[in-house]
Image (spheres, grey):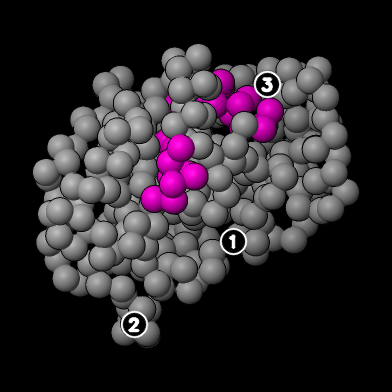
Amino acid sequence: MGKIIAIHSYKGGTGKTLLSVNLATTYARRGMKVCLLDLDFRAPSLQSLFDLNSTEYWLNDYLNGACKIEKTLIDYTSMCECSGRMLVGLANPATEALRDMSAKDRKWEMRALGRLLSLKNTLLSDGDLDVLLYDTSPGLQYSSINAIVSADIVMVVCTIDTSDIQGTKRMTHELYDLFEKKTAILMNKVPTEFLSSPNEKESIYTRFNNSHALPILKVIPCYCDVLRAGGTRIFARDFPDHPFTKHVEDIATKLEQFTRNGEEPVREPINEPVVEANLSELQCQCNYERSKE
């Protein structure tokens, strides 16, 4: 049976959604059957990246009991140009839908949790999927807690912002330890100058290792052209040779090993290089996209 991976964060703006989309695309391009669900009901954004303004059924409808999960899924296999299969379920971005989801009570959330738990059978077992990815709401919303409870593995995306580090520490201690979830930290949008020398890299790792007992899965530099794309490009599809794509491919491999072996990713020693000593990767690659046109 396939596995459920939840992509979570303490704060918004960590790059969680972009990582989720590129991770799903990477798996699909490896020939796997993948489904990506937008569970960020307070600020859904996948519909923008996939250029879809309306659909007959949203994930909101499934959680409300108005339809089966299959009705909400859209086949994006041809769009991601993959050898596997890529399904996407979107959250309703309409203002009325956002208000409706924000007003849900505890009883509704418990029923919604039951529906998420049932996806292990309907999509992974009966649907023969290899990976089910949840792009969750940041923080400790009921919807994100439900996603974490129903997932097999959680990847928490964090930046070097002090409030993000401290908030992530509280969140993982208070929530993840309670549910005993297999969890790893991904450090994203790290300024490249912080990764350009052994001392700087050791400082970054020390800050995180002093705050977290969780393994650091990966450190991704902040790339100007990824930011400039504004969430409109799928780098794993459009720029397969870009360093950001290579990082995502490495994450996909590590998570796949994590799910298959059941062993936590090995914590990288702080004296090991976070990224290859490659100037083309450490420099801000603002001209990458232009050079490929």
x 23%, y 48%: residue: 203
Q: Which residues are magenta?
A: 141-166
In this rendering, position of residue 73 left or right of residue 68 = left
Q: Of label 1 and label 2, which has the lower sequence position?
A: 1
Q: Is residue 244 magenta?
A: no
Of residues 146 and 233, which is closer to you in this image?
146
**Quarter that holds the N terminus:** top left
Q: CA distance from mark 2 to mark 3?
A: 45 Å
Identity of the amino acid at label 3?
Leu
Q: CA distance from mark 1 to mark 2?
A: 22 Å
Report the disc number at residue 287: 2
Residue 113 bears which disc, if any? 3
Instruction: State the SS at label 2.
Output: loop
Does residue 253 appear left or right of residue 168 in this picture? left
User: Where does the image place residue 73, in percent across and percent down from the top left?
Assistant: 65, 42
Instruction: Report if the CB atoms under discs 1 and 2 are less than 8 Å apart.
Output: no
- At label 2, the amino acid type is Asn
User: Marks 3/1: CA distance?
Assistant: 27 Å
Q: Which residue is mark 1?
A: 49
Q: Nearer the viewer, residue 12 or 211?
A: 211
Mark 2, residues whose alpha carbon is within 10 Å: few (<14), some, or many (≥20)?
few
